[in-house]
Amino acid sequence: MPKKKKQQAVPFTWASVPLPPTSDFAPPFEDEPELSKFVKKPKAYRQLDAVGNIYRGPAVPKPAPCADEEWPTCECPPGEGCGDHCFNRSVFMECKLGACRGGLNRANGDCGNTATQTRAFPPTEVVLTPGCGWGLRVEAPVTKGRPLAEYCGEVITTDMCRERLGNLERGEDFYFASLDAHLVLDAAHMGSNAR
């Protein structure tokens, strides 16, 4: 019996055009400059990189900052910073800026596990990739585990989300991320490069 040829995974769409299933798929253009002649730029949006999220309406109040005694503390040695050994970092929780033992006697009290609070993200750019659409490229070398960006947008209620979903045109992109049972982050009209 002849050996069956293994099929390659095929993306569902390329530049919003449905692709026929094929075992020898290759994007029509291999290089970015040629591809960008035929594909429009990403939808324009308001950049929120420096300010974080926007909270919409009286039903979505901006949360109050945690009191010092409620903020989780790590057991890092004083003044050494919080590296891979930091408990907070291992559970994807930031240390409180200026209140972490690991940041004692360091510049600005920063232990190194405060990227979202200090907006200390590496430079990035939005790029068009052959066969995969828009992506985010880091413009500088980064270490494993370093936060690259914060997904920012409008914080809205689930009811507002349902209304916005109902108003979308067929095939229109949307950028929703559920925060909890009642709140959703919408990055369609404002957000960071991470959208």
Image (cartoon, rainbow, N blue to C red):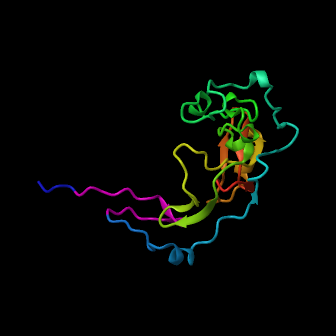
Magenta part, dominant SS: loop
Q: Residue at x 70, y 56 (%)?
A: 168
Q: Check residue 22 for magenta coloring.
A: yes
Q: Check residue 13 for magenta coloring.
A: yes
Provide the residue span drawn in magenta: 5-23
Residue 65 position, x and y percent, is: 81, 32
| Vertical position of residue 148 compared to residue 25: above or below | above
Which residue lies most toward the left here? 1
Quarter assignment of residue 29: bottom left
Which residue lies most toward the right here? 58
The N terminus is located in which quarter?
bottom left
Q: Residue at x 71, y 55 (%)?
A: 188
Would residue 144 be found to the left or right of residue 10 on screen?
right
Residue 110 visible (yes or no): yes
Residue 44 position, x and y percent, is: 72, 64
Q: Nearer the viewer, residue 1 or 186?
A: 186
Q: Nearer the viewer, residue 160 or 126?
A: 126
